[in-house]
Image (spheres, rainbow, N blue to C red):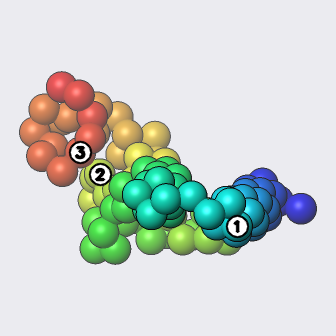
Amino acid sequence: MTRINIFKKLKLLEKSIYDDLLNKIKELNLDDETMEKIEQFSVKPNRKAPVTPLEKQCGKLTKKGEKCKIAICYKKTCWAHLTKEEYGVLNMNKKDCGECMHIA
């Protein structure tokens, strides 16, 4: 089982436990105000990672066979797919490269 599948299963288990607890609390005949507070409680979702727009992604195939999602840096290529010569030119001109994420 992959890590993502494990997390999904744990979230489903957590949700089912929470729903069971809510059902048992409803049977206790608490006042309406307390019940509303309990029902409004929810777990905040985790922050999602930022996504680079498709037009700014490299798009070349990686070793795994997937499309590269790293931002374009130099000559429509990301830093991971640059040749040694292109990388040397990029390092010399990184102050001029407005699209690049390198710190000048």
Q: Quadrant of residue 37?
A: bottom left
Relative to 83, residue 23 above or below: below
Marks 1 and 3: CB-CB under 8 Å?
Answer: no
Q: Position of residue 69 (x, y in %)?
A: 46, 62
Taking the spot 68% from the left edge, 60% from the top edge, the residue there is 28
Q: Residues within 10 Å of mark 3 (few under 14, many from 20)?
A: some
Q: Confirm whether residue 82 shows in the render.
A: no
Residue 27 is tagged as 1
Circle 3: residue type: Cys
Q: Residue at x 15, y 43 (%)?
A: 97
Residue 78 image label: none
Find disc 2 in the rendering and name its residue: 73
**Which quadrant: the C terminus?**
top left
Cβ atoms at labels 2 and 3 below 8 Å apart = yes
Question: Which of the two residues, 71 or 34, is positioned nearer the viewer here?
Answer: 34
Measured in 3D between alpha carbons, the distance from the residue under mark 2 to the one under mark 3, in whole angstroms, is 5 Å
Number of marks in picture? 3
Tell me if mark 1 has few (under 14), some (14-19) or many (20+) residues whose alpha carbon lies within 10 angstroms of its own: few
Answer with left or right where residue 88 lies relative to residue 97. right
Residue type indicated by callout 1 = Glu
Dot placed on the residue nearer the N-terminal end, 1 or 3: 1
Q: Measure the C-alpha gap from mark 1 to mark 3.
A: 60 Å
Left or right position of 74 against 14 = left
Identify which residue, 63 or 16, lies in the foreground: 16
